[in-house]
Structures are given as C-alpha cells and as structure tokens.
Image (cartoon, helix red, strand yellow):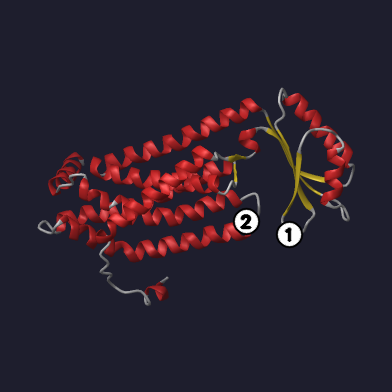
Amino acid sequence: MISLLKFLPQEFKIDFMRRRWIGFIFSAALTLASLVSIAVQGFNFGIDFSGGVLIEAEVPEGVHVSDIRAKVSSLDLGEVAVTTLGESGREVSLRLGQPKDSDEKSEMRAVAKIKEVLGEGYTYKRVDVVGPKVGGELIQDGVYAILGAMAIIGIYIWIRFEWQYSIGAMLGLIHDVITAAGIFSLFQIEFDLTVVAALLTVAGYSINDTVVQFDRVRENLRRYKKMELYDLLNRSLNEVFTRTLLTSFTTFLAAASLLAFGGDVLRGFSLAVTWGVIAGTYSSFYMALPTLLYTGLRRDDSEDAEVAKTDAMP
C-alpha cells in the first residue's frame, strides 16, 4: 500500500462539482433504464423464488449431458433443463420448473423418479424443492429486507449528521441498488437469494464511502467558515479521493476475482457486488455530495449538531 501511494499525487485538484449535472443526468438515465427493464422484462427468478426442483450432481465417467437429458425426458415431468457446471464437465444441474397444480409431495416424487432413472454412480451435492407459496413469500421477504435496510441506513445518516445529508445518501443508495437489479433484469441473469444478499451488501458498501466523505465535509465546515460551499465540497472530495480510490480498487479486485473464479453458484452474488463497488464509488462523488448544494446545508446546522453532541457527553 505504501509503495502504491508513492505513485499517486499528494493532492488532487479535481473540480467534481462542475460535472455534477452530467452525473445527475447519467445516474437518472441508468436508474430509469433499470426500472423500465424490470417493469417490462421482470427477473429470471431462480428456484428460490419461482419454485420447482433443482438438483446438482456429479456424474460418473463417460456419462454425457445428452444421455442425462434423454433419460429425464422419458419421465414426462415437463420441461427439464440440464446444464453443466464448472470446467470438469462432470457436474450437472437439473432444473424442473414449477408445474401447475403441484405440491411439495409431488415434487419429492419427481426427485425420486429422476434419481431412479439416472441410476447409480451419481453424487448428489444439492437437492432443493421449493413450493410456489414459499417462493412467493421469499420474494416478498426479499423486497422487505432491501427496503428495510435502506430505510435504516437513511435514519442512521439523519441521526449521525443532519437531514440534508440523508437525502443525498438515500439517492445514492437507490441508484446503486436499482441499477444492480436492473443488470439482472436486462440480461436475464438468474435472480436468487444470493443476489438479494448481494444487494444488501451493495447498500452497505455504497454508504461506506459516503459516510467518510460526509465526515470530511463536516470537519471542513468548521475549519473553513468563509469558504463557499461549492469549493468546500470540492476540497473535501479531493482530500479523500486517494483513500476512496485505493479502497474501491482493492474491493473491486476481490469482487472481480470472485466473479472470475467463484463458479456458477456465486456468479450472481459476485456480479452484483462487483457492480456495487463501481456504482457505489461513483454515486458518492456525483450524487450524494453534490446533492448538498441543493438541500440548504448551512454551517450553523453542522455546528449546532456538534455542540449538541458535545453537551450531551458526560
């Protein structure tokens, strides 16, 4: 880390605020496109949400996907998707969609039939059976979890700073989470519970840089009492730019490595986190802080908040 810092300027002088409207328009366009895709195409829900049967197994030597597909198709269970997993070619995934008027017992019987027709020599690593009622409840719970997390983060920013800060923070959060979900809708990438966990991770990471920048703004409000807010926000962003750059780059490398080498099971999670690192860093610079120019932020707000906290301390 120290050697890398030697190659970075000691002080940046980037006029972030001058490009704020480009950032606002670009963010609004991304968010709108994501919402349109979600409304028109929806999501390619995984077995967790759509219901049905998912079987992952390691096949014996010499068995091909075409052989498995032919055996399973003979059972007349409806459409069964058979795909390979990993690079070895010996791991397969069998997905049986949720048929109409089915229940958990009928799906368990379908699993038993599939195992029977495949025969011996298979190692079953995962067998999931999700009914339509459970899938619908999981969708509802996932939405509540994401909205609840965002609301709690907004309240935290309000208490930690002032309401003016929470507006920018919430705009950044909404942008990051919706655009991450929009990628899954646009490209019809499987959306399952791991993606919900990733969206919650995106919300947490998104607010991380924003809180650091808000802290620097509050410090500079007390330090430079006569500086224009436009210049003060630029100065604050430039002061934390190196820290943000290194932190985001390190996190991006970890997320990208997981995306490249984590396999099919973690692909949705790692894709959402990778995008979240990029979007979260961008939104903190071009959405969260520039919004302070329009929320009526005053120096006495910050000073009064600090005085109140100081007086409340024992």
Above or below, 102 against 164 in this view is above
Residue 205 in view here = yes
On residue 262, which mark appears? 2
Residue shown at 48%/60% (left/top)? 252
Q: How many marks?
A: 2
Q: Are marks 1 and 2 in contact (CB under 8 Å)?
A: no
Residue shown at 87%/55% (left/top)? 61
Nearest the viewer among 66 and 125 is 66
Above or below, 186 against 226 in this view is above
Q: Which quarter of the rendered picture does the C terminus lie within?
A: top left
Q: Nearer the viewer, mark 1 or mark 2?
A: 1
Secondary structure of the residue carrying tag 2 is loop
Q: Which is more N-terminal, label 2 or label 1? A: 1
Residue 203 in view here = no
On residue 87, which mark appears? 1
Residue 285: image location, x then y, percent: 32, 56
Could you tell me the amino acid type at mark 2? Gly
- Determine whether, in the image, residue 270 is placed left or right of residue 298: right
Q: Residues within 10 Å of mark 1 (few under 14, many from 20)?
A: few
Residue 15: image location, x then y, percent: 25, 64
Residue 295: image location, x then y, percent: 21, 44
Residue 53: image location, x then y, percent: 72, 35
